[in-house]
Image (tube, helix red, strand yellow):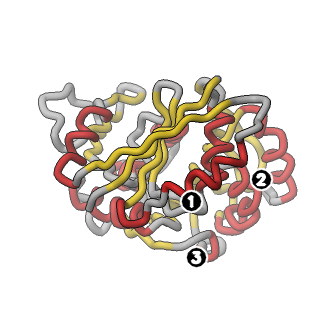
Amino acid sequence: MNYVEVIIEIEPFSDDYADLVIAQIEELPYESFATENGCLKAYIPEEKYSSGDLRALLSAFTNSPDFRLKSRASLIHEQNWNILWESNFPPISIGGKCTIKASFHKGLPKTKYTITIDPKMAFGTGHHQTTSLMVESLLEAEVKDKRLLDVGCGTGILSILAAKMGAVAPVHAIDIDPVAVASTEENVKKNRVQGGVVAFCGDASLIQTGRYDILLANINRNIILQDIGTYSGALTASGRLYISGFYSEDLPMILEEAKKCSLEFVRERRRDNWMAAELKKVD
């Protein structure tokens, strides 16, 4: 499949402004977003791309007093897709315990856990601050023999790591994006944890009550606020909820809502302005 890469220059650039642009255009069928060098990159199948639709939505920012936009688009042929990921996806080591790499990376130093992914169009290579924060949290958690759910699984990194750490099989992974579900299933096979992870396409309505010891949700502030009651209901007594995908200034409102849902704050992690938090189910 061919894709169109849309590069949106944001001047001055900030993650907040990039999030505003994503929120404006996400009704279009873009399958992935990334930020790099002061630009927002968006990817969409060639047959679904409409320059007119994009211009119409971006016109909402024409008179913005805060930032200016400039966009351009280019075609990425199917045979070039892996080359693109190879150039943009260096291997990483998190906490000295977990290496995240692509299948074309060879001869890397060994760590306790190695996860091989081919991200394609699904979100999650471990390079984004929120993913690495969640990996760090999971590496320090008591995962062995725990029942675990990964909401917004993306490429399946967290689910695969949990399976390798000895979580009760199968780890359940959920994402509303069928591309993410397919990517997770493919990466589960690459990491030889078949039977250790099962992925479902859907939203929080799929979550079962009182089933999980650990729930992971690396999504965004609004979805967390909307679904945190469901997350709490899914946890067993003293179960742990690990959340990320939001900024440090969002934490107070999330904790206020969490308290209403019988969740107690345990600790936080920060990287740049991104944050992850651990919450505990209380009576």
Judged left or right of residue 207, residue 108 is: left
Foreground pick, 52 / 172 = 52
Of the residues under marks 3 and 1, which one precedes in the sequence? 1
Q: Which image quadrant for residue 234? A: bottom right
Of the residues under marks 3 and 2, which one precedes in the sequence? 3
Q: What residue is shown with label 1?
A: 53
Foreground pick, 165 / 92 = 92
**Distance from label 3 to label 1 (Cα)?**
33 Å
Judged left or right of residue 243, residue 255 is: right
Q: Within 10 Å of the Cα at label 3, are there few (<14), some (14-19), or many (20+) other Cα atoms?
A: few
Q: What percent of the width, then of the height, locates residue 195?
A: 30, 69
* Residue 187 visible: yes
Name the amino acid type tagged 3.
Leu
Q: What residue is shown with label 2?
A: 263
- What secondary structure is found at the residue carrying circle 3? helix
Q: Within 10 Å of the Cα at label 2, are there few (<14), some (14-19), or many (20+) other Cα atoms?
A: many
Decide: marks 3, 2 in contact (CB < 8 A)? no
Name the amino acid type tagged 1.
Asp
Name of the residue lying farthest toward the front = 52
Name the amino acid type tagged 2.
Leu
Of the residues under marks 2 and 1, which one precedes in the sequence? 1
Q: What percent of the width, then of the height, locates residue 115?
A: 29, 44
Q: What residue is shown with label 3?
A: 206
**Distance from label 3 to label 2 (Cα)?**
21 Å
Q: Which image quadrant for residue 21? A: top right
Residue 231 sits above or below residue 119 on the image: below
Q: What percent of the width, then of the height, locates residue 169?
A: 38, 66
